[in-house]
Amino acid sequence: MSQLKAFIEKSKADKELMAKLDELGAKDAGADEIIALAKENGFTITADEIEKMKDGDEASGELKEEDLEAVTGGWTENRYDPKTCKNMSRNKYECKGFSEIIFCDHYRRIRDDWNQKKYTHKCVKDAFPTYLGNKQGEPKQF
């Protein structure tokens, strides 16, 4: 298992570590801060590995979505916060969690087109209007 995958697995089991990752994600921390946190916990990861994971680079060995769901058990949590979510115009960190490991129970990302990498993004609580975008949720015209 790669160091990055092992670090992610540990973060799923360690609520304190996941809270630190959530803090880093919420402030859109750079790779250097994530690498430092991994190192504090005994893992050696690189900025390149983090970027490949975020971009969904198939060469990175990323699991397919159905494989990921099987591994994580479709791990979600209620991240809905009426104060934050009612002001959203698109998905944000709160919808996907750190590196898209733990999605909000109410967020849906549906792959519409494999060739164009087109996704529908939706909040079942209507925190933001349903829209088309890339995997990360950036709105895009197709």
Image (tube, grey):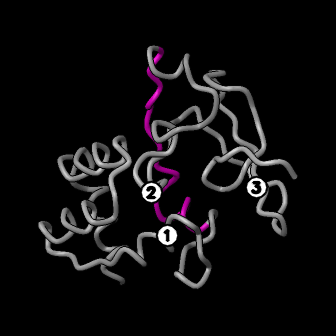
Indicate the amino acid at tag 3. Answer: Arg
Taking the spot 73% from the left edge, 48% from the top edge, the residue there is: 133
At x 43%, y 37%, the residue is: 77
Q: So how many labels did they put on this image?
A: 3
Q: Is residue 43 above or below residue 139?
A: below
- Report the residue at 81% width, 66% height from top: 114
User: Where's the N terminus, which quadrant?
Assistant: bottom left
Crowd band around label 3 with a 10 angstrom C-alpha radius: few (<14), some (14–19), many (20+): some
CB-based contact (under 8 Å), mark 1 and mark 2? yes
Indicate the quadrant where residue 113 lies. bottom right
Q: Could you say whether the residue bearing mark 1 is in a helix, strand or loop?
A: helix
The location of residue 92, given as percent across then percent down, is 52, 38
141 horizontally vs 70: left or right: right
Which mark sits nearer the N-terminus, 1 or 2? Answer: 1
Assess whether residue 66 is covered by the magenta stretch: no
How far from the left and from the top, in percent, is residue 30?
34, 58
User: Which residue in the structure is indicated by mark 1?
Assistant: 53
Residue denoted by label 2: 99
**Mark whose residue sits in front, 3 or 1:** 1
Which of the two labelled residues, at mark 3 and mark 1, occupies the earlier sequence position? 1
Magenta stretch, residue numbers: 67-82
Amino acid at circle 1: Met
Instruction: Tell me the residue that label 3 is attached to.
Output: 111
| Three-letter amino acid code at the position of disc 2 | Ser
Residue drawn at x 64%, y 47% as measured from the top left: 137
The picture places residue 65, in percent across and down from the top left corner, at 62, 63
- The Cα atoms of the two marked residues, 3 and 1, are separated by 17 Å
Q: Residues within 10 Å of mark 1 (few under 14, many from 20)?
A: many
- Position of 28 with respect to 112 (left or right) is left
The CA distance from mark 3 to mark 2 is 18 Å
Tell me which corner region of the image, top left, top right, bottom left or bottom right, holds residue 58.
bottom right
